[in-house]
Image (cartoon, rainbow, N blue to C red):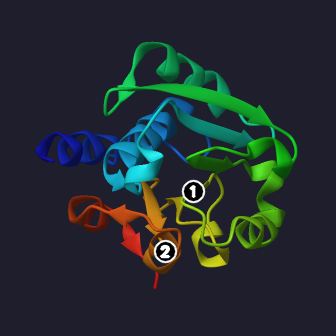
Amino acid sequence: MLFLALVLRGLWSGNYKAQETDYKAYTLFVYNFMKYIEWPEAQNKGDFIIAVLGDSPISKELQVLASGKKIKGRAIVLKKCNTFEETSGCHLLYISASKSASVKTFKDQIKDKPILIVGEREGLAKKGAGLSFVTLEDDELKFDINKKEIEQHQLKISGSLINLGIVIN
């Protein structure tokens, strides 16, 4: 828990500018989201699947992460997807900026399935994502948390992660 706080606070020290999106930083955030959110017991078997919907430079960084890390003892598998149907079976759905206009549609399609929706674009947590990235005025990278959406998908978010984000509901 302390490690998470130190790493995320280090990222927020102003080193990552809004003008230059640092997808390595985004990837580190996503990895910590996976560590500090609990899925129901039935989803804790087999590979942990991340679906990236649409084109995003994060895909390359997540592939590097998947090849070198595990999450709670499970292999991480990355699926690059262009349609919602291709995301089936995922634990985490990362919606790229290019697909962000459809976040409400995707949210409605997965209803209460245990899937964490992470939005690449600011404001997506207000539209149905559980988490979305936001850059503050001082170029500090943070994330919005829609606790209601996360809980609706049968997921539990750690208090330490809540303390580091911006709760919007």
As drawn, the label of residue 151 is none
Q: Secondary structure at mark 1?
A: loop
Please name the amino acid that badge 2 sits on: Asn
- The residue shown at (34%, 41%) is 11
Q: Residues within 10 Å of mark 1 (few under 14, many from 20)?
A: many
Residue at x 41% of width, y 44% of height? 34
**Residue corresponding to mark 2:** 146
For label 2, the crowd category at 10 Å Cα-Cα, with few meaning under 14, some 14 to 19 and many 20 or more, is: many
Drawn side of residue 162 relative to residue 129, left or right: left
- Residue furthest to the front in view is 42
Which residue appears farthest toward the left when viewing the image? 2
Q: Position of residue 12 (x, y in %)?
A: 34, 48
Q: How many marks?
A: 2
What is the quadrant of residue 104 in the picture? bottom right
Q: Which residue is mark 1?
A: 115
Q: CA distance from mark 2 to mark 1?
A: 13 Å
